[in-house]
């Protein structure tokens, strides 16, 4: 071949190569991910294309090399030999390594027929790989040990490049802040919120990001002890009183930290006479992580701080410490007798059959009147009626209604009788129907003032009545809550004292001694019998100070939460407190009497 012909040959060859790129492509690229990407120097970003064979022939392809870009193979991806069947396709997955790739448009990827560079195709120019390499980004984290609280440990890191970050920790083990930081950034990890009962400290918390994740921040929390009860109430041991059995009760100490609590010690108070304590805790030794031990308190016959004289008791405090525990745990212990002030009232009923890993049950009556009692002298300026039609002042404010299951006779009035009376009394009862039966409980009404009060409230929290408003008036109801401060049970429900708001109007046999007009059963714990120190003399010069306590005496006429079974709509039971002449009886609900609320002890 002469030189002239040789030149012609290469000219033709170049034209063929150019035509291979310019002609209709035999395989095409459809981007499945963004193809303009930023990749940190220490990370890898994946880019994918769907490569489709447009011809009726199979083709085996080879990708032209791009520094820092490699093909990923595997299930659902193009094979390493890039064989495309006739009209077939596969997903080309590329790993872009920020440490090896160069910034800029790579003009690729380019796939050529195996064995020839004359049949090569690339994506449309808008879809070719366009790469920006950015500085390395890294996480900051480490390990938490010793955490064992019911509340979160909150960590914070301050950095140069991003806003402050916080991370809540609720367990031991590795952690990392979610926001990545740029290489060269400084960081400083601190504790923002300590978990309840623990102190956690940070080591290796500060440094500079050096193109690698930080994993050596160490957060260490102290051993952590808990007590099963903060306040433990026990009954005195009084063999002459059936309810005061003096059951021994337990406090459980638990090490919820991740390592042993060492050098364990217990400091006991000076106990009331006869009260003792024992323990299974290893005094001077170690309580392992997750382990428990028990302190058992056995009460004697003497109450805490002579609290049955009407003085609020000062509890005995048990303090449990360990050498490697930042904060000791404490339990306040009360040994209680009738008349002790506890949980906002005077104790008059005790249930010592509750589980011995917690406090006694029981009932207290409020420390003072919620409505002043009617006295024989006639003073009743701030007394209150039993039930109200929601009239605040002036006129007749009472309401006569059947409330189910709250008379002195069990099950009376029943739901059907109450509903029938309501329908006969209120002309718009077809519009505002009697509350459904499931809102009323079947009460042990003589001794369960809380149940009685709930039934009363179920009615008067649903409707306002206009009962008694003028002669010849058609009685109607309107939807809405009757103002609770207008009637006795509502007054108790809205009362709050000493942090307790679950007060109720007591039942007649919670107030009265055995026998009496209401036929209260013998053995029923009641205010009259068990709170003699609080009951005053109704005919004294100053009845309110005539009791042993010397102030806020129970004296005069007080409402109970029971209605009278013979005249359920109009009559309710009351208690007359007068020293040795205590009695109970019934009167119209419209009479102004006193209120002294009660509540059940919280466990």
Image (spheres, rainbow, N blue to C red):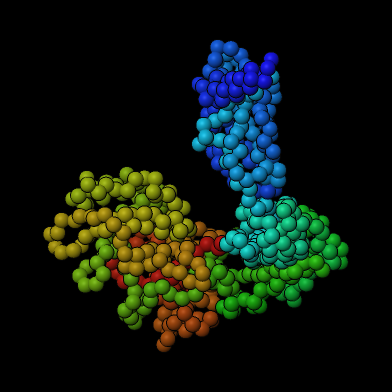
For the point 55% across and 12% down, the residue is 56
Residue 177 sits above or below residue 551 on the image:
above
Residue 416 sits above or below residue 183 on the image:
above
236, 184: nearer the viewer: 184
Position of the C terminus by quadrant? bottom right
Residue found at the far bottom of this picture? 541
70, 405: nearer the viewer: 70
For the point 57% across and 22% down, the residue is 15
Does residue 359 appear in the picture of this structure? Answer: no
Residue found at the far top of this picture? 56
Q: In which quarter of the image is residue 555?
A: bottom left
Residue 33 sits above or below residue 270 on the image:
above
In the rendering, at what x and y percent does residue 572 appear? 34, 62
505 to the left or right of 305: left
Position of the N terminus by quadrant? top right
The tally of labels here is 0
229, 552: nearer the viewer: 229
170, 475: nearer the viewer: 170
Does residue 418 appear in the picture of this structure? Answer: yes
In the rendering, at what x and y percent does residue 281 appear? 81, 61
For the point 44% across and 52% down, the residue is 443
Residue found at the far left of this picture? 472
Residue 391 sits above or below residue 105 on the image:
below
Q: In which quarter of the image is residue 392?
A: bottom left
In the rendering, at what x and y percent does residue 421 appear? 26, 49
For the point 63% across and 51% down, the residue is 134
Q: In which quarter of the image is residue 574?
A: bottom left
In the rendering, at what x and y percent does residue 41 appear? 68, 48
167 to the left or right of 222: left
């Amino acid at each position: 071949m002469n030189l002239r012909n040789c030149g012609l040959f290469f000219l033709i060859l170049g034209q063929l190569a150019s035509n291979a790129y310019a002609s209709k492509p035999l395989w095409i690229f459809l981007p499945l991910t963004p193809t303009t990407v930023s990749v940190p120097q220490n990370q890898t970003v994946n880019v994918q294309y769907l490569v489709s064979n447009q011809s009726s022939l199979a083709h085996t392809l080879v990708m032209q090399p791009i520094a820092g870009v490699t093909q990923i193979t595997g299930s659902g991806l193009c094979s390493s030999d890039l064989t495309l069947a006739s009209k077939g396709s596969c997903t080309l997955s590329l790993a872009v390594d920020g440490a090896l790739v160069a910034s800029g448009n790579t003009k690729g990827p380019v796939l050529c027929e195996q064995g020839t560079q004359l049949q090569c195709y690339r994506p449309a120019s808008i879809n070719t790989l366009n790469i920006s390499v950015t500085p390395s980004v890294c996480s900051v984290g480490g390990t938490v040990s010793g955490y064992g609280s019911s509340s979160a440990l909150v960590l914070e890191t301050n950095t140069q490049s991003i806003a402050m970050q916080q991370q809540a920790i609720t367990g031991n083990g590795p952690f990392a802040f979610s926001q990545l930081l740029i290489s060269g950034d400084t960081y400083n990890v601190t504790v923002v919120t300590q978990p309840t009962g623990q102190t956690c400290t940070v080591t290796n918390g500060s440094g500079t990001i050096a193109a690698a994740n930080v994993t050596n921040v160490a957060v260490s929390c102290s051993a952590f002890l808990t007590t099963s009860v903060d306040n433990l109430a026990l009954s005195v041991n009084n063999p002459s009183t059936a309810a005061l059995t003096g059951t021994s009760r337990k406090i459980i100490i638990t090490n919820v930290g991740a390592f042993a609590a060492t050098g364990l010690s217990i400091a006991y108070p000076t106990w009331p006479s006869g009260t003792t304590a024992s323990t299974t805790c290893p005094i001077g030794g170690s309580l392992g992580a997750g382990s428990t031990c028990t302190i058992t308190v056995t009460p004697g016959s003497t109450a805490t701080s002579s609290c049955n004289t009407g003085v609020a008791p000062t509890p005995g405090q048990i303090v449990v410490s360990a050498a490697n525990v930042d904060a000791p745990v404490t339990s306040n212990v009360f040994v209680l007798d009738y008349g002790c002030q506890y949980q906002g009232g005077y104790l008059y009923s005790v249930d010592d059959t509750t589980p011995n890993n917690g406090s006694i049950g029981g009932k207290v009556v409020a420390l003072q009147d919620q409505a002043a009692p009617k006295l024989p002298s006639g003073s009743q300026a701030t007394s209150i009626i039993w039930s109200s039609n929601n009239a605040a002042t002036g006129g007749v404010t009472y309401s006569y209604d059947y409330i189910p299951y709250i008379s002195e006779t069990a099950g009376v009035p029943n739901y059907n009788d109450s509903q029938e009376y309501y329908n006969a009394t209120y002309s718009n009862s077809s519009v505002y129907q009697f509350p459904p039966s499931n809102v009323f409980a079947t009460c042990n009404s003589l001794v369960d003032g809380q149940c009685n009060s709930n039934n009363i409230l179920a009615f008067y929290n649903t409707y306002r009545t206009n009962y008694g408003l003028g002669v010849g008036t058609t009685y109607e109801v309107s939807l809405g809550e009757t103002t609770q401060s207008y009637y006795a049970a509502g007054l108790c429900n809205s009362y709050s004292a000493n942090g307790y708001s679950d007060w109720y109007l007591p039942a007649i046999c919670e107030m009265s001694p055995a026998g009496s007009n209401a036929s209260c059963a013998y053995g029923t714990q009641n205010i009259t019998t068990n709170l003699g120190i609080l009951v005053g003399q109704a005919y004294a010069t100053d009845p309110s100070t005539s009791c042993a306590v010397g102030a806020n005496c129970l004296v005069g006429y007080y409402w109970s939460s029971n209605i009278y079974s013979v005249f359920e709509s109009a009559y309710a039971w009351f208690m007359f407190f007068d020293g040795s002449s205590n009695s109970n009886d019934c009167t119209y609900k419209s009479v102004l009497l006193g209120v002294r609320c009660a509540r059940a002890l919280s466990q």
